[in-house]
Amino acid sequence: MGFVGRRLVEMLVERGAERVVAFDIAPRPADAPDDDRVVWMQGDLTDPAAVMRACEGSECVWHIAALVGPYHAKDMYMKVNYQGTLNVVDACKKLKIKKIVMSSSPSTRFDGKDINGKRESELEIPKKFLQEYAESKARGEEACMAACDGENLLTVAVAPHQVYGPRDFLFLHNFLLNASRLRVFGPGDNLVSVCYVDNYCHGLILGERALYPGSPALRKFYICTDGEPVKLWRFIDDALVQILGIPSLFSKFKLPGWGFMYPLGRVCECVGSVLGKKLKLNTFAVRMLLINRHFNGDAARDDLGYAPIVDSETAWERTVGWFREEWVPKYAPGRVGKADAAAAAGGAKKKGGKAARGAAKTRK
């Protein structure tokens, strides 16, 4: 189970849920503690029958499962992120479950330009998407929000931006694995919003509380963050220095962004097209490392009552502490072989990758 899904399950139980079904394409985590309140159910989001079984008896579905990242087959994104969402909506309708909190993504609103402190209402779903993941998530979100009738089925979309924290095997994990060859793209002063995993899960839980007839949150899209934006490259650099104990990236030469790395990303896309594979360096990845991406969180505060429950300093201390204690001994470069490092990347080569990970249901 992904680190957001697993933490959400934990926090739901911590806040009094009597029964939480954790539905995931992967088996129960080996280190998950025994708890009668948590039911681990393995299944595929693209299987309507499996989704129906997982949802049965629930009062709310937190739909956080998704196929993420830019490296999967194109058809899988729509199969998982769009059709999978339709399966969740259909199950809720048939089982008369009244609430769906959908985990969305700010990338559904990205058009490639800087985002400087915009509110969610100022972000539009573009006509042309930057990647298949974003389009499939947007179509899934549109379908889920359209299913809300204001009474029998209530829905809301809540997204994080650049979520991080303990057990993160997606964001910081990949930068840490590639620390030795990583360089700052451009000047390194672009600003982004980030969100600690507990803060995001708090926002997802608040989303359920905001689902009632007449709520201003119905059919709406919200973004949860830690508050003030951070400089992306300084954030990454602090992780490398404090977790791995290596010299700062800013002590090394920087790579020109738009004039060198972006054209190189285009070349890699062409080469990948010829080879029939997706290379990790591409124009989308380069763009995301160069532009500003920070948001105004007033709407989540006003409609959901959202505010971070863990301050940035404490969140960072917990994250660095976990990586030092748990991640470094197993996955730090030079300590594991390539096969182990690949396995640590989150099982992306399994059927559907993260396709069916993290659809949590609860009965209060």
Image: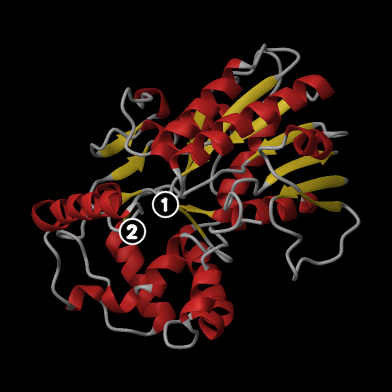
Q: In the image, which disc is placed on residue 269?
A: none
Tell me if 80 is positioned left or right of 241 in this view: right
Name, please, the residue furthest toward the bottom.
335
Q: Is residue 209 left or right of residue 134?
A: right
x, y (%) of residue 85? 62, 31
Residue to which mark 1 is pinned: 71
Tell whether 100 sits left or right of 327: right
Measured as percent of width and height from the top left, residue 88 is found at: 69, 30
Element type at marker 2? Answer: loop
| N-terminal-most mark, 1 or 2 | 1
Vertical relation: 95 (above or below) 235: above
Looking at the rendered image, the quarter that the N terminus falls into is bottom right
Residue nearest the viewer, comparing 338 with 179 = 338
Above-or-below relation of 192 to 61 = below
Residue 217 shows in this picture: no
**Quarter of the figure that contains the C terminus:** top right
Residue at the image position 81 percent from the left and 31 percent from the top:
59
Q: Amino acid at mark 2?
A: Lys
Mark 1–mark 2 CB contact (< 8 Å): yes
Q: Which residue is mark 2?
A: 280
Residue 329 shows up from this direction: yes
Please state which amino acid type lies under the numbered disc 1.
Tyr
For numbered disc 1, what is the local secondary structure? loop
Name the residue: 24% across, 47% down: 291
Instruction: Report the side of 121 relative to 41 (left or right).
Output: left
Task: Give the alpha-carbon distance from disc 1 to disc 2, as whole Å.
Answer: 7 Å
